[in-house]
Amino acid sequence: MAYTRKAFGPLLQAALIMGVCVVFFVGTVRIWLWYRGEPSTPGANLKARITAIVPQITTGSPQSRLTAIQSLGAVLRRFGPSAPYAQAIPAMRKALRDPEMSVREATAETLGILGLAARPATPELTTALKDEDLSVQIAAGRALLGIGGEPQVQALRALAEVVANPEPIPNRSSIIEVMQSVGEPGEDAAAQALARLLANTDSTARDDAVSCVAAFGAGITRILPALDAMLKSDDPALRYTAALAKIRAEGLNANPDPRAIMILAEAVSNTSLLPMERQSALAALYEIPPGEFEAAGMASVVSSVRPPMSAALRQCGLELARQLEHKRADIRLTAANLLHMINPEDLAGKNESDREEMYPDH
């Protein structure tokens, strides 16, 4: 008996200590949840909380209405379909007509969390697609995409107009990504909209379109036919834009289009283009984002990059060398800077074998 007590005594003590620790841990978690003001499980407390929030969405000051709808959004993000959201939808439908833009935007974003369950708010969300504020239009479009059916078609149409709009839009790429999230219809609509922007007469809008090409990801093939057509344009600026976009779209790990390579090589040497445009063309030939050049300096990154087509770069070097004797000082300075950015091995023609490997028939 004494032996048994000696053997099991430590085990009983360990079990007792573990039990106390578990009780302490559970109690601490519950206290933390109570302190955060959030129920540990969806249920009566959650319903009571939403019930308390709903009236505040449409009453009080603009800031209190915004805080209320943001609080509701936080609850819905955490609990999703398990939250008793139905009681909040009538208030959110009304909030979509709120005089404050921030409240309308936050309301559309909150409805977007519900997906298909936001269908009762379809009429108000459809009206919000024509809101005077762009951010509200975009938020409403995203919410309608989650509902599907005809509302989704209307949303894609509206978002495509936003993408094709030449006015500066800070989140154009994110709109394209959202459109693609609904599959082929979204990919097609986004590609057609971006093609329209690429063909815009405003050079700033075209530059923005080029920067959005990478947002297509796996759906990039849908924009390539439009780029192919633009490469044949009579407009040099449009050809340059298309070449820049196509190189960025395809990447040089695949077989880059020889027409795009040629157009970009010509752009590097084109004195009628702005220095930044010529540098962007050279960046595309080396498949390095222009921002990386600006941040680290071209010479510091080119040496470690396999050039796409040494013959084209060598031809650029020869033309830039001629421009060093140009009568205009700014052209001479740009030519010198660009020459400094080209890998010396390309200037010397040491990478000619790369061209033969990539283009044996050219």
Image: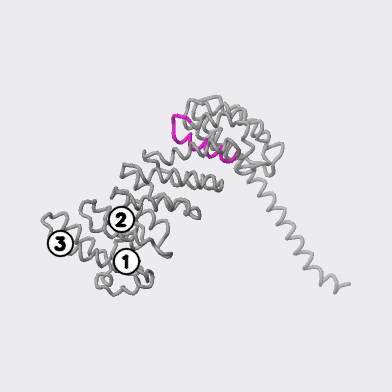
User: Marks 2 and 3: CB-CB under 8 Å?
Assistant: no
Spatial CA distance of label 2 from label 1 is 14 Å
Q: Nearer the viewer, residue 252 or 259?
A: 259
**How many residues crowd mark 3 within 10 Å: few (<14), some (14–19), many (20+)?**
some
Q: Look at the image and name its color scheme.
A: one colour
- Residue for point 54% across, 29% down: 96
Going by the numbered disc 3, the residue's amino acid type is: Leu
Report if residue 146 lies within the magenta region. yes
Above/below status of 16 relative to 4: above
Above/below status of 89 relative to 332: above
**How many residues crowd mark 1 within 10 Å: few (<14), some (14–19), many (20+)?**
some
What residue is shown with label 1?
Answer: 302
What residue is shown with label 3?
Answer: 324
Going by the numbered disc 2, the residue's amino acid type is: Ser
In which quadrant is the N terminus drawn?
A: bottom right
State the image coordinates of residue 204 (x, y, percent, origin top left). Answer: 32, 44
Q: Earlier in the sequence, mark 2 or mark 1?
A: 2
User: Marks 3 and 1: CB-CB under 8 Å?
Assistant: no
Q: Which mark is residue 280?
A: 2
Spatial CA distance of label 2 from label 3 is 20 Å
State the image coordinates of residue 17 (x, y, percent, origin top left). Answer: 73, 60
Going by the numbered disc 1, the residue's amino acid type is: Val
Question: Element under label 1?
Answer: helix
Task: Specify the farthest residue to the left.
Answer: 327
Q: Earlier in the sequence, mark 2 or mark 3?
A: 2
**Total marks placed:** 3
Please report the bounds of the magenta region as a residue range. Answer: 130-147
Question: Element under label 2?
Answer: helix
